[in-house]
Amino acid sequence: MNARVIRSVFCGSAALLAAVMLTAAAAANDVDAIRSSITATFRQMNVPVEGGFKVFRGNIDFDPGNLKAARARIEIDTASFDLGAPEYEEELRGKEWFDSPAYPKASFDSSSVAAVGPDRFEARGKFTLKAKTQEIKVPFTIRSEGGARVFEGELPISRKIYAIGSSEWDDTLDDKVIVKFRITTNAK
Amino acid sequence: MNHGTRYTTVAISLHWLIALLIFAGWGLGIYMSDLPLSPAKLRYYSWHKWMGVTTFMLVVLRAGWLATHPAPGLPLTLSPWQARTARVTHFALYLLMFAIPLSGWLMSSAKGVPTVYFGVLRIPDLIGKNQVVGTVLDVVHSSLAFSLAALVGVHVAAALKHHFMDHDGLMGRMVPFLKPPRL
């Protein structure tokens, strides 16, 4: 009995310690999901419909004075797409759309960042969605907000390239989906 | 004051045009809401909204016309309670013809699917996206639509009763090819 108590206390403490360490490790440059948003706007017959990804994570190393060292990695849970209409969200997790059970994550992995204007930059990198990877350009602006960094931008993503929605949708739904992001990191 | 025994041509045209839109919009509304997600479903939703916007504008026009061109007087054969019921029913019909498109418009905004008239003209959102408000407005919109269906049923039944049972020519006030009533 004593052994069991000791064991569970030990396991509990270890888990607590691990959690504390993880939290500590998740400090600088990590995406603060609560103060960030990633949305996708679909357009059907000129009607814009916006949804947001509720779960994503990542890390952005960014020093405007040393762009060569800049690196961003963002990972999005496709199942977390929230349209504000549960009956459609279930559908969007299905095979024809995100196919979240088979491809739970979409990701962006930067390879280079270039300045294109005052506080305006362009990242290039690999975007992977539904197991298809493309080289994309991500324009963004940057500003400081209470000691945190805010990266903002938007870019078009083609549905067809990533096989989001079958071809029967092509007459109704634009190929171009506008992805908007506002990423806050805990940079010091 | 309208001294004729039938409605003006403008009022008659608006009545039948709006009736057609109400029947089509109501039927499409019932049909589309139970469809599984498909391109056709979204198309029907857009069409339904276009019908609603059109109906709303025609109803505004019609109310304005009615205000400036009063309806012909009711046949004197009508008892006071019948005349009163007719007035109340017509008032309720107008109220619903305004309220139903309006609730649909608000519901579209609350559900985050704005109305774009004929895919060209974006109708402004009066309220923001809110799932709970959207669900409530959905119930309001369909309840009002079912009330309208019931009221239209009463309206049509009364018209037919006057025509086939009372033979008072009341229907001739609104049906172009029928004889207008004698006062």
Image: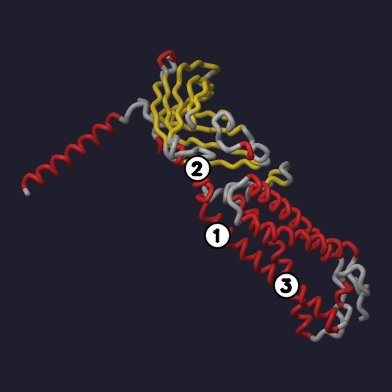
Q: Secondary structure at mark 3?
A: helix
Residue A108 placed where, x, y %? 46, 26
Instruction: Write down the chain letter for disc 3.
Output: B
Which quarter of the rendered picture does the C terminus of chain B lie within? bottom right
> Which quarter of the figure has residue A11?
top left
Q: Secondary structure at mark 1?
A: helix
The residue singled out by tag 2 in the image is A94
Q: Residue at x 45, y 21 (%)?
A: A110
> Which quarter of the figure has residue B65?
bottom right
Residue B181 drawn above or below residue B55: below
Tell me the amino acid under the disc marked 3: Gly
Instruction: Write down the chain letter for disc 2.
Output: A
How many other residues sit within 10 Å of disc 2, few (<14), some (14-19) or many (≥20)?
Answer: some
Q: Nearer the viewer, mark 1 or mark 3?
A: 3
Q: Is residue B87 left or right of residue A15?
A: right
* Total numbered labels placed on residues in the image: 3
Q: Residue at x 54, y 36 (%)?
A: A40
Which quarter of the rendered picture does the N terminus of chain B lie within? bottom right
Of A151 and B78, which appears nearest the observer? Answer: B78
Of B21 and B44, which appears nearest the observer? Answer: B44
* C-alpha separation, residue under disc 2 versus residue under disc 3: 43 Å
The residue singled out by tag 1 in the image is B136
* C-alpha separation, residue under disc 1 versus residue under disc 2: 28 Å
Q: Nearer the viewer, mark 1 or mark 2?
A: 2
Is the residue at mark 1 from the same chain as the one at mark 3?
yes
Q: Is residue B145 left or right of residue B181?
A: left
Is the residue at mark 2 from the same chain as the one at mark 3?
no
Residue A115 drawn above or below residue B122: above
Q: Secondary structure at mark 2?
A: loop
Is the residue at mark 1 from the same chain as the one at mark 2?
no
Residue A51 placed where, x, y %? 53, 41
State the mark number for residue B153. Answer: 3
